[in-house]
Amino acid sequence: MSTALANERLRKRFARWDVDGNGLLELNDFQQEAARIAQGFGKPEDAPEVQALRDAFEALYAHLSERSGSAQAGITEDSFLRATEELLFSGGEAAFNRALGPVVKSLVTLSDANGDGVLDGQEFEAWLVAIGLPAGQAGEVLSKVDENGDGVLSEDELLRVVREYHYGRLDIELLG
Ligand SMILES: [Ca+2]
Ligand SMILES: [Ca+2]
Ligand SMILES: [Ca+2]
């Protein structure tokens, strides 16, 4: 595992989540990020699945804020790196899944057009496009991350992709 690469990815993650670019992660950044993704899905703001996404991002912010020991003012890059490194490298899989699980779950709900709880190629394509990736990559990515080879992606498989990316072990960024 490359901690340098993981570190670089966490810095990038910080920059992306710092939507207003003021050098601090704040609740408002996470609300804006949720709104941006919802817009990518073309969903109205008051749709229940959009509310669920916003709740998940707000909970993630609360979790990070608590872990980084930050005051109400926001999370600095240094404390974000400390908190997330701890989450990735000492907290282990369970801690990571608790923190990011709700966000991944709400993204699955937003993408899951036929409501069967897993994502086929078309549904996964909707996810990738919503977070701003060019269209047409879903098939290739899906075959890479479909661990049990059943042709669809489960929440667990998707959560593993997000985790492995932040460990620096996989090159697919699913959080936008
Ligand atoms: Ca900010
Ligand atoms: Ca589905
Ligand atoms: Ca699968």
Image: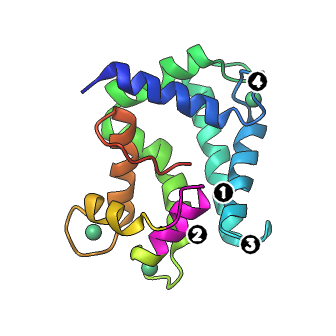
Residue 126 is covered by the magenta coloring: yes
Mark pair 4, 1: CA separation: 25 Å
Q: Dot 1, crowdedness within 10 Å: few (<14), some or many (≥20)?
A: many
Q: Secondary structure at mark 2?
A: helix
Q: Quadrant of ligand 1?
A: top right
Judge depth for marks 3 and 1 and give the one in front. Answer: 1
Residue tagged by mark 1? 37
Mark 2 or 4: the one toward you: 2
The residue under label 4 is: 72
Which of the two discs, 3 and 4, labels the residue nearer the N terminus? Answer: 3
Span colored in magenta: 123-135
Quarter of the image with the N terminus is: top left
Q: Is mark 2 within 8 Å of ligand 2?
A: no
The numbered mark, 2 or 4, whose residue comes first in the sequence reads 4
State how far apart marks 2 and 4 are (Cα).
30 Å
34 or 121: nearer the viewer: 121
Identify the mark nearer the N-term, 4 or 1: 1
Q: Which residue is mark 2?
A: 110
- Location of mark 3 (residue): 47
What element does badge 3 sit on? loop
Mark 2 Cα shell of 10 Å, populated few (<14), some (14-19), many (≥20): many
Q: Identity of the amino acid at label 4?
A: Gln
The numbered mark at residue 167 is none
Point out the residue furthest to the left here.
148
Three-letter residue code for mark 2: Leu
Residue 111 image point, x, y percent = 54, 71
The kind of residue on which mark 1 rests is Ile
